Image (cartoon, rainbow, N blue to C red):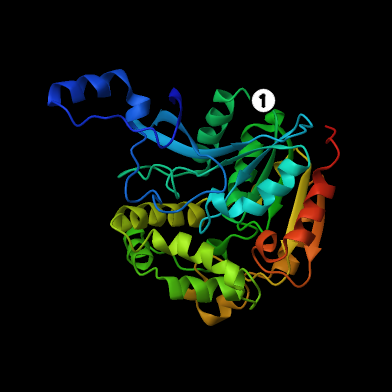
Amino acid sequence: MRNIGNVTMGMEMKLSRAPALLAVALALAPAAAALAQSPSELPGFSYPHPIAAYAFTSQGLPMKMAYMDVKAEKPNGRTVVLLHGKNFCAATWEGTIEALSQNGYRVIAPDQIGFCKSTKPERYQYSFQQLAANTHALLTSLGIQRVIILGHSTGGMLGTRYALMYPDAVERLAMVNPIGLEDWKALGVPALSVDQQYERELSTAPERVRAYEQSTYYAGEWRPEFDKWVNMYAGQFTGPGREIVARNTALIDDMIYTQPVVYEFPLLKVPVLLLIGQKDTTAIGKEAAPPDVRAKLGHYPELGKAAAAAIKNARLVEFPSLGHAPQIQDPQAFHKALLDGIGEHASQ
């Protein structure tokens, strides 16, 4: 991986002159050239804080990882890295960023490659190892050596991989309703090819997203402010960049299905905080599973306890009435539990 710089998004090179000038400019400023937002990078959706871009090369391709770097007014010297889920973006951490920064934490909130305002390559071999390495390179470029990792949903799987790869760089791992607490493939969920996943992703529409989120993220509840996140996510599949978004999302679906982390929980060396909404029923691919298999999946009251038992140094916090996204559904209760859980330095 070769770093070619951190630059601020929104700065556009004026390259509308002669082709020769264009070629020179691109040769001299590859990082700046990487900033042009494509239709697949949420150009019409505003984030709660300024966005920067980490430009680098991965798998021989130029990449741009969008991120927010929010510094506390009264720093406590600690940094929290927020890892979003598959149907989320860095922006969906809006309330958590505010709660953390108000309590002294510096916050780094990236959009992973393939998501939201970051690059969606035509071809990429997705793995949690690769996404963890990308994130670690971003933090290294910022001079950040040790962090608290907070991962939600798919971000919990990524956070687990990050903590396994870089244990000395992780003060604590916190996971919010992480998926990957069970191995769906081993439990009988049928495999779908990337092409099949691509066709499914192309059918993403706001009404479908809203129905799914109401049932799983918010335990049947719906409030008008949730619509912003529906429009954010579903909007990626309705604009001119929908096909490349769907292609990358299908590859990410395959990564999630084929790279379980549940077997490696006993190998974690860092303290772990599990924050689990008990009404969550998320299980990847369960709608394609036979009824008898489907009935066994996504039981988070059991999954949270099993994960806490498997991890050597784990603390479990349960939210009895909340679903897959407790940080959005009940931010006050969630942020109190989070701040209490990470409030003291972890000893190793």
SS of the residue under disc 1: loop
Q: Quadrant of the C terminus?
A: top right
**Residue at figure coordinates x 52%, y 76% from the top left:** 211
**Residue 220 versus residue 175: which sits nearer the camera?**
220
Where residue 71 sits, quadrant-wise, is top right
- Residue 96: x and y in percent read 68, 51
- Residue 127: x and y in percent read 48, 43
Asked if residue 3 lies left or right of residue 317, the reply is: left
Please determine whether, in this image, residue 103 is positioned above or below residue 11: below
Give the mark count.
1
Residue under label 1 = 145
- Residue 322: x and y in percent read 72, 69
Whether residue 306 is visible, yes or no, is no
Looking at numbered disc 1 in the image, what kind of residue is underneath it? Gln
- Residue 9: x and y in percent read 43, 36
Q: Quadrant of the N terminus?
A: top left
Whether residue 214 is visible, yes or no, is yes
Please determine whether, in this image, residue 154 is positioned above or below residue 37: below
Please determine whether, in this image, residue 293 is positioned above or below residue 191: below
